[in-house]
Every structure is written in C-alpha cells, then in structure tokens.
Amino acid sequence: MAPGTATKPIKVFLVDDHEVVRRGVAALLDGEEDMKVVGEAGTAEQALARIPAASPDVAVLDVRLPGGSGVGVCREIRSDRPEIACLMLTSFADDEALFEAVMAGAAGYVLKQIHGADLVGAVRTVAAGGSLLDPGSTGRVMERLRSNPPRPDPLSELSPQERQILDLIGEGLTNRQIGERLDLAEKTVKNYVSSLLSKLDLKRRTQAAVLVAELRTRGRSHFE
C-alpha cells in the first residue's frame, strides 16, 4: 500500500484445522500493510458461526475440515454473504474437489505448497473480484457440466418421513431432539438419517444441512 493512502486493509478470515498452519498464514498476511486477519476457525461449524460476524472480504478455507468441508462452508457463506470471496486452500490437486469448489462459488483454488508471496497475491486477486481458477481445470469442469445430464430432484427418492427429518437436520437438531419432536426412538432417527444420506449421496449430516440451506435459498418447500 502506498504511503499516505487511506485504503482500508483487506480483511481475511482463516479456516484450517491445523493451528500451526493458521498461525503461519496469519503471520504472513498480517505482515502485509494492506491486510488484516480478522478471525480464525478450526472446524466447519466454527467457520459458519464466526465468518458472518467478522465480515471479512476474503475467507481462506481448507477444503477438508472436521465436521464438514471448506467447500460446504463456501457454499453456505456465498449463499448468505455473496460479497465475501472464498479462496480454497488444499494439500492435494483433486478435480472432484475443484468441481465442487467451482459449483460452490469459490473465487480461487490453490495448493498449500504455494509460495508465501503467491498466497498474498492470491488473496489480493480474489479480494479485488478476480478469479484464481486455472483455465485448464475450469475447462474440465465446464466439459463435465456439458456432458452430465441434470440431476433429478434430489428429494424425489426420500420418503415423507425422511424429508421431515432432513428439514429438522437443516434446523440444527440432533438425532435425540428430532426423536423428541417426531415421537421416534433415537435409534430409529439414526437409521432414517443414514438412509436419507445414502439416497442423497452424502457422507455427513453437515452436508445435508447445507443442502437444506440451498433449497431454502431457492424457495423450495421440502414437502412439495
């Protein structure tokens, strides 16, 4: 930042389950005159709770997180706060994760092996509204979109009971709370949750909660 300018620093929020990584990236970014780390999180749940309150310009998200994924966090944050740019940080080059990141609205996708100066540049680029998605990689994503037929209604295979339980997962209820709400045994609820996750091709209930948020954003009713 040039001397004498009054430009506000780029506010950055860091999400990584490794504290050492967060500290290293925070030290790197805070060392820049035009950047300020405004918050950190180590899990998907913490990230979703803290990012809106911190109001960063850029969220740097590890793709793999306890209790969810950086891609899921990106999807939900971009849905509620589209002005926040999401930069995905990962240890592995993975076309599937890249595809999911692009679909979630990520502005950039870089490997953790990136040099410090390049990461700083990446944050500046996405903060300014630019994209850091490799043209070759995004080309493969677009080809996949063109070659794959649209997915059917993701809820079409769920029973009415499973749809109701999915809706309650979206409200953040535990299996025990869902059982109390629907007068079902906790073990029965657990079986329903396993079944609906399988039908929706999801691995974690956090992903199911993100799906509910997406459908609500689109104005969908789960009981149509």
Image: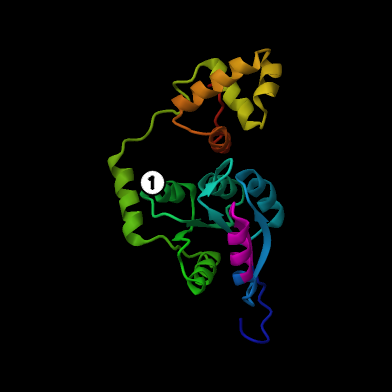
Residue at the image position 54 percent from the left and 30 percent from the top:
220
Q: Quadrant of residue 218?
A: top right
Judged left or right of residue 194, residue 172 is right
- The quadrant in which residue 145 appears is top left
Which of 159/18 is in front?
Answer: 18
Where residue 60 appears, as percent x and y from the top left, is: 56, 58
- Compared with 36, 204 (above or below) is above
Residue 209 position within the rendered picture, expressed as x and y whole percent measured from the top left:
58, 34
Q: Is residue 21 left or right of residue 39?
A: left
Determine if residue 58 is in view: no
Q: Does residue 25 show up magenta in the picture?
A: yes
How many numbered tags mark residues here?
1
Determine crowd level at label 1: few under 14, some 14-19, many 20+ residues with C-alpha closer than 10 A: few
Please tell me whether residue 221 is drawn above or below residue 124 in the rendered image. Answer: above
Numbered range of the magenta stretch: 11-27
Q: Position of residue 20 (x, y in %)?
A: 61, 60
Decide if residue 193 is on the left or right side of residue 181: left
Residue at the spot 47% in from the left edge and 32% down from the top edge:
202
Apparent side of residue 146 relative to residue 128 in the rendered image (left or right)? left
Q: Depth check: give the residue in front, 36 or 114.
A: 114
- Is residue 218 inside the magenta stretch? no
* Color encoding of the figure: rainbow
Residue sitting at the far front: 20
Q: Is residue 47 above or below residue 202?
A: below
Residue 47 visible in the shown view: yes
Mark 1 secondary-structure assignment:
helix
Can you identify the residue that label 1 sits on? 96
Farthest residue to the bottom: give it: 3
Residue at the location (60% across, 66% down)?
Answer: 24
Query: Residue visible at 36% across and 50% down?
Result: 95
Give, as a three-letter code, the residue at label 1: Glu
Q: Quadrant of the N terminus?
A: bottom right
